[in-house]
Amino acid sequence: MQSSANSSTGNSLTVWILGGLLLGLGCGAVLHATVPDTTGWVQGFTLITTVFLRLIKMVIAPLVFATLVVGIAKMGDTGSVGRIGLKAFLWFLCASLTSLALGLVLVNFFQPGISMGISLPDAGASSGITTKEFGLQEFILHLVPVSIVDGMARNEILQIVVFSVFFGVACAGVGKPAAVLVEALEGLSYVMLKLTMLVMWFAPLAVFAAVSAAVAKSGLGILAVYGTFMMEFYFAILVLWLVLFAAAWGVIGRRAIKLFRAVREPVVLAFATASSEAAYPRTLAQLERFGCSNRVASFVLPLGYSFNLDGSMMYCTFAVMFIAQAYGIELTLAQQLTMLLTLMVTSKGMAGVPRASLVVIAATLSQFNIPEAGLLLLLGVDHFLDMARSATNVVGNSVATAVVSKWEGQLREEDAENPDLARAISAELPQA
């Protein structure tokens, strides 16, 4: 009965979010067609979306810290942490290479930039995207927070993960004297999940506002201009989803179907808000309900948000090659493979940077003498492309978490363990 109620409320929220998405498309189209200057409307809608995303972000730091520390402390030894981390990184590496390579193959097959039929920006024009060097040294230094308070204040998930790992290992080493602290942090994780569910009440409104703002600003006409390119990119995303599903099936069998069903709500939320970060708390809750071990999910999922952004990585290869094709620049196979390896590194180094995909693309364009102004071709539809890659990031990280849980022998039946957690994540949600 409990599981049925949870499923009903989850489906209801999904319906509300999809309703907000469709309503936003209609409202934005009407405003774009009837209001001469939509700036005020766009600013108002953007404010609503920003408030919602901030409400979600205020949960992430304490949730990651609490769940990760508790999970590691309960492992009891550093060997388990290292083993799980190694398995996760091996999966991330394979998934990243697959995403990048698949994007490269499909963009060469479709060649969307060749037949765009629109005027190209002047090669010397500025894209407005600020790039910066982010080499190995900077990446390593970025891993370690100057202060955990600073890392949490800026929602640097990777820095929070590093501190939490050390803190959790220390708690495990101390043993019984730290038991009260670990128990308190476990209580904190339940409170954060409950708080997330309360914030989710505002998700349909935020989705409506986000889509309305995007359409009111650019209009549905821009979708027609870039229709072929967008359909080809969405087809590439669909192929990637099928690959991820096949990989999940290969490891967890028929439960792959249940996994995709379990995370449909956070996937829809990420798609509608164009933010995979907005779906993080709900993804964690749904994965634990699905049967992923708390100690594995709380470790692998936040790592995935820094190292396993499958949708964003596919977009990087797709976008760079699209711009090169639009300007008639042919890249040799060797250059394309070099670009793939370059993106493999830079996509990790830019984790947590606002509009990270565009920043990575801008940096890559300059390395291969492709006009950075080509980014202007993408800015108008970037929000709609971001919707697809954000949803894919959630799918990729969900699969990674389930796979590592299976490899660790800690993938249980749904709700078969930790009934307190099951109750904590079954808050009341909007009913259809």
Image (tube, rainbow, N blue to C red):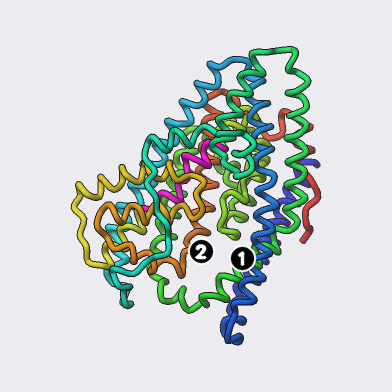
Q: Where is residue 2 in the image (x, y as percent from the top left)?
A: 79, 41
Q: What residue type is labelled 1?
A: Ala
Q: Residue at x 81, y 50 (%)?
A: 428
Residue wearing tag 1: 210
Q: Which mark is residue 369?
A: none
Quadrant containing the C terminus in the rendered view: bottom right
Depth check, front residue: 422 or 277: 277
Give the answer, above or below, for where 158 lies relative to 57. Answer: above
Residue wearing tag 2: 383
Tell me how far mark 1 sits from mark 2, CA to CA: 9 Å
Quadrant containing the N terminus in the rendered view: top right
Q: In which quarter of the image is residue 322?
A: bottom left
Q: Are marks 1 and 2 in contact (CB under 8 Å)?
A: yes
Depth check, front residue: 345 or 30: 345
Depth check, front residue: 388 or 53: 53
Magenta run includes residue 314: yes
